[in-house]
Image (cartoon, rainbow, N blue to C red):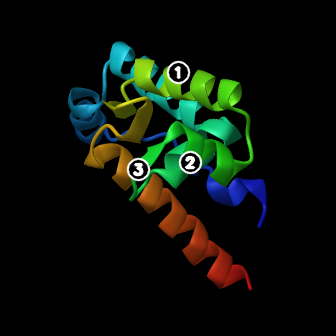
Amino acid sequence: MEEKEYICGEKCPHYQTIRKVKQEEPNEEEIEMVSNMFKLFADNTRLRIICSILNTELCVCDLCELLDLNQSTVSHQLQILRNAKLVKYRREGKQIYYRLQDEHIEQIISTSLEHIREEEGKIK
């Protein structure tokens, strides 16, 4: 397809639709917050941690073993995720267990994985 096929043939903005979109669109602060959240997901180590605790609470030593990472790396990434309120933890004796903050994070990751897996199925 040529580039011309993706461009309107005439300049005729639909002002009623534009007004509706402007009323419903997120403000700049919300855009910034969503952008920052997706930046957190863009790091492979953090995303691996999130996927590991998607359905199961795990302690730090379990995450280290599962992901083949040292404790310093895992702890650092968990701190970033905690500060962003993507994960929460509980202490049991000397062990600290992590899980996702809420079902919204689970939905974002699960939906993304579902989308990727569907698209992979279409390609193969």
Residue identifier under label 1: 80
Q: Nearer the viewer, mark 3 or mark 2?
A: 2
Type of residue at label 2? Asp
Please state if 24 lies on the left or on the right of 70 as rendered.
Answer: left
Whole-number angstrom distance, CA of label 3 to CA of label 2? 24 Å
Whole-number angstrom distance, CA of label 1 to CA of label 3? 18 Å
Please count the marks in the image: 3
- The residue at the point 73 percent across, 34 percent down is 70
Mark 3, secondary structure of its residue = helix
> Badge 3 local density, few (<14 within 10 Å), some, or many (20+)?
few
Mark 2, secondary structure of its residue = helix
Give yes or no for contact between labels 1 and 3 (Cβ–Cβ under 8 Å): no
Q: Nearer the viewer, mark 2 or mark 1?
A: 2
Q: Give whichever of 103, 112 is nearer the camera.
A: 103
Q: Give whichever of 61, 29 is nearer the camera.
A: 61
Residue identifier under label 3: 108
> Badge 2 local density, few (<14 within 10 Å), some, or many (20+)?
some
Residue lying furthest front: 93
Type of residue at label 3? Ile
Q: The N terminus is located in which quarter?
A: bottom right
Whole-number angstrom distance, CA of label 2 to CA of label 1? 18 Å
Q: The C terminus is located in which quarter?
A: bottom right
Where residue 90 appears, as percent x and y from the top left, is 31, 32
First of labels 3, 2 by sequence position: 2
Please state if 49 lies on the left or on the right of 30 as rendered.
Answer: right
Type of residue at label 1? Ile
Please state if 48 lies on the left or on the right of 19 as rendered.
Answer: right
Residue identifier under label 2: 62
